[in-house]
Image: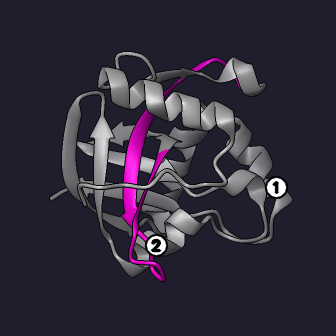
Amino acid sequence: MSEVNVPANMPEWMADHLRRYLKTDGADGHMWDSTSVGGPGPLPTLLLTTVGRRSGQTSLLPLIYGETNGKYIIVASKGGAPQHPGWYHNLVAQPTVEVQVLADRFRATARTATGEERATLWQQMEKIYPPYNDYQAKTDREIPVVVLERA
């Protein structure tokens, strides 16, 4: 997964965040100042690289994360849209992903948390980013909580 594509439809503020993160190994970008888009303030972000389930091409994007027991947690919220984000469908189809946290780059296996584990991780993530609750209220789908385990 060495060559990656930045999604063409990525908003410019997100593409800028991604470029700064990559250029500085996360020194500028790991703690993303979400106030620029109406968020609550600095949030920890990682970079996730997935393989397209249809295209077979790799795609890279920054995501808010939490950490528990050496595992990274991300939320497939898509702002409460009725459908899951494309990156989530990609990692369900191909759970081997690449992750970057600051300068640490590694392969990981992604899985969707369920049951009590999901509930516990959701509570952790809503403390990091409270709008997740608003997103869940906007949609009928259960927003997936994804666990990334270092390979």
**Secondary structure under the numbered disc 1 in the rendered image:** helix
In the rendered structure, which disc, 2 or 1, sits on the residue that comes first in sequence? 2
Q: Position of residue 57 (x, y in %)?
A: 40, 70
Q: Is residue 51 left or right of residue 87?
A: left
- In the rendered structure, find residue 90 and report the number of the disc placed on it: 2
Q: Amino acid at mark 2?
A: Asn
Which sits in the foreground, 86 or 84?
86
Q: Position of residue 61 (x, y in %)?
A: 48, 47
The residue stretch that appears in magenta: 39-61
Does residue 45 show up magenta in the picture? yes
Residue underneath mark 1: 137
25 in relation to 139, above or below: above
Farthest residue to the right: give it. 138
Q: Amino acid at mark 1?
A: Ala
Give the number of the mark in front: 2 or 1: 2
Say few, some or many: other residues with alpha carbon within 10 Å of mark 1 (under 14 / 14 to 19 / 20 or more).
few
